[in-house]
Amino acid sequence: MIRRLVFLLPAGLAMLAGLDAALLLLGLPAPLTTDRLPDVHGMLLVLGFVGTVIALERSVALRSRAGFAAPALLGIGALVLLSPAPLRVGQFLLVAGCAALVGIYVPLFRRSYDDSVMIQALGAVLALGGALLWTAGVPMPDVLPWLAGFIVATIIGERLELARVIRLAPRTVNQLLALVVALMASVTATLLWPGPGYALLGATILALVAWLAVHDVARRTIRSTGLPRFMAGCLLAGYAWLAVAGGVWLLHGRTSEGFAYDAVIHSVFLGFTLSMIFAHAPVILPAVLRVRLPYHPVMIVPAALLHASLALRVLVGDARQIEWARQVGGVLNITALLLFVVITVASIVVASRRSPAASSARRPTTTPDSTAPDSTSPAAPITSPTAPTSRTVAP
């Protein structure tokens, strides 16, 4: 656990720094103020935080020491962005980390030749493209579609794996593959031909949301109880926010500043991405860190706060151009994420203290807990014992 936790520490620092930068961008006081911080806000949260978590999970699934280069490079790159070191150094480290993440997917795909792994690999290619463009000096608003594509493709690939418990027809899978190819093409088009490119990107994202609405297993598990229902609720809410982003891109086109820009990027990276992280944290963290994280209904509180505050920010603040609603919603967005982190850490600590006593009481009659994920197994990593290569963000 300790060795893997080392890889998560830079991700945690990147998250905190990114939230600090969010306050600055909202025009509010923040604990830390530097000239660079607002400029690296997006990269800190997407590649430094979420990217490191994704890379760590994939390296655990790979079961190779070489695979840990990806989370190490991404995490160190995020720390360099926070330091006085030249910006270029941090940019190159993020590029190297994304390239290493692409490299992880090669043996993973050869292991199973699974479409879901290929989709996730294409997402990593988009992350690499985004990091390269940022290093080359492309403005962040033009890089964001690449980062959004990275998150979307990664999660789509994981959801495809889980959807197979309902035995998808080959034609249905081929439809998804075609949509992912369209996603790659539309992201590229946003840079070369912004007018039609953003419209195509928005339409593709809406089509992907429609596919998920029909075929994702969350549509069924929302009627269950406990953790499955919590996960399904987070997933479906996240898909709704992704549809909002797709609609803005389709109707508004390229956004580089102002309320429309705020709405689209936070619908993707807060509403969609954080929903995925909230949904899968109770299964990702045990798999990666080898700890117990039992689900508790209190986890619903930060999830509900996230979506309510994002609705205030986007549907009131951005849609009606009301600055106070955008600011209040933004602060509550930050509060929701920090509250979820506190609840998660507290749950792990409580479970670890109870575990020895429970294990001692069971020892004469039972074997060790067979439900705890085995992070050394490619079948354990993520959301279901039926998903040998699946994963999530984690957000």
Image (spheres, rainbow, N blue to C red):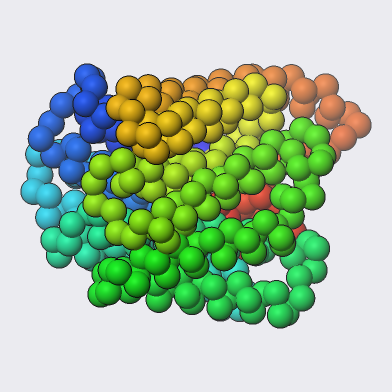
Q: At 72% from the left edge and 62% from the top edge, which residue is drawn? A: 215
Q: Is residue 327 left or right of residue 357?
A: left
Q: Residue furthest front?
A: 320
Please determine whether, in this image, residue 298 is positioned above or below residue 205. above
Q: Position of residue 371 (x, y in %)?
A: 76, 42
Name the side, left or right, on which 87 lies relative to 178: left
* Residue 327 in picture, x, y percent from top left: 33, 25
**Whether residue 294 is situated above or below residue 36 in the rendered picture:** above
Q: Is residue 357 left or right of residue 127?
A: right
Residue 22 found in image quarter: top left
- Answer whether residue 122 is visible to the viewer in this image: no
Residue 257 image position (x, y, % from top left): 23, 46
Farthest right residue in view: 365
**Is any atom of residue 227 visible in this view?**
yes
Q: In front: 185, or 312? A: 312
Residue at x 30%, y 59% (from the top left corner):
254
Q: Quadrant of residue 379?
A: bottom right
Q: Residue at coordinates 47% horizontally, 55% vertically from top-left?
A: 247
Residue at screen point 69% across, 25% down: 296
Q: Position of residue 100 (x, y in %)?
A: 36, 65
